[in-house]
Image (cartoon, rainbow, N blue to C red):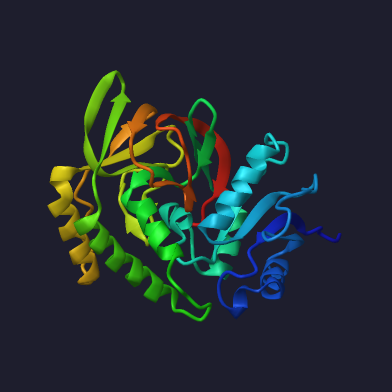
Amino acid sequence: MKIEPTKIELVHNPTAGAEEHEAEHLTELLKAAGYKVYYGSSKKKILKKVAVDSRLIVVAGGDGTVRKSIIALLDKKMKYKRPIAILPLGTANNIASSLKIEENLKLNVDAWRKEKLQKLDVGLAKTKKEEEYFIESFGFGLFPALVKWMDEQARTPAEDPEDEVRQAHNALLHLSKHYETFEATLVNDGKEISGKFLMLELLNISRLGPKLELAKNANPGDGKLELIMVKENQRPQLIKYFEEIIAGKKPVFPIKSVPVTQLKLSVTCKDLHVDDELKDTKFHTWDISVLPNLFDVVLTN
């Protein structure tokens, strides 16, 4: 009796990765592993239609492609909910790395048969008129300033991704020395914290930016976010951390994160990011919460 191949939806960023990550090579890899592939480019209408008999939604690309795919599923009100498998093809791959997902594509695909799943939460930040969902992080200060700086740099497609990471580390060292602090007030579990800060970040995963593990204890499926607050008087610790990174060491991030489920944040800073995107906002008070266990992600280790 002929065994029918398992059907999967493939969302692929055609500009991510090397030649072996092109659509033809990926679909051949998946077919050889016993899958029938419904292909869709992330550059077009993402997940416009999902076949009812698809078993998995496979996302091949970097963190931005993973985020776009998950937000697209949210926009469809979970109508097309399937387990999500990630083929990490980006520069940082923070989501995949935080979940310890295999970078070797063949080993990654072979592991899907084990059906080992991890719950994935989604963060939600709201004002009176705005609503932002995030998979990785939501924050003010240093890291959106880095994104703004990186967007202004002239880069070519041939640039070594590791050169880009090193460039970002050097930029963070410069920013940690010179970035102007901002005032903020946070209310967490009835306790108020006020002060001047270099950065405020709410992480759903352990890693942020150019491959930096900032919240080692983050669990993207525990219904909590990890809050990182770097105050004005902690600037020397931050500078030392980036100096050690640039020197090739592997330091532990010196500011411990705080687990939160809900947070009210009033902030004067205009440098805001949602995952890897900069955002403009006129609102300075945010209610931040967690939408728990919305998705399943296929693990490979």
| Residue sitting at the far front | 282
> What residue sits 79% from the left and 47% below the top?
53
Q: Judge by depth and name the residue closer to the eye, 74 or 266.
A: 266
Above-or-below relation of 165 to 142: below
Above-or-below relation of 47 to 91: above
212 sits left or right of 120 in the view: left
> What residue sits 42% from the left and 35% below the top?
222
Q: Judge by depth and name the residue closer to the eye, 80 or 203.
A: 203
> What residue sits 37% from the left and 27% below the top?
263
255 sits left or right of 157 in the view: left
In which image quadrant can residue 6 be found?
bottom right
Residue 114 visible in the snapshot: no
In which image quadrant can residue 111 be found?
bottom right
Across and down, in percent, residue 187 comes to 31, 24
Across and down, in percent, residue 287 comes to 43, 27
206 sits left or right of 173 in the view: right
> What residue sits 46% from the left and 79% below the top?
159
180 sits left or right of 30 in the view: left
Across and down, in percent, residue 80 comes to 72, 41
User: Which image quadrant: the N terminus?
Assistant: bottom right
Across and down, in percent, residue 68 comes to 60, 50
In which image quadrant can residue 29 be found?
bottom right
Q: Judge by depth and name the residue closer to the eye, 38 or 6.
A: 38
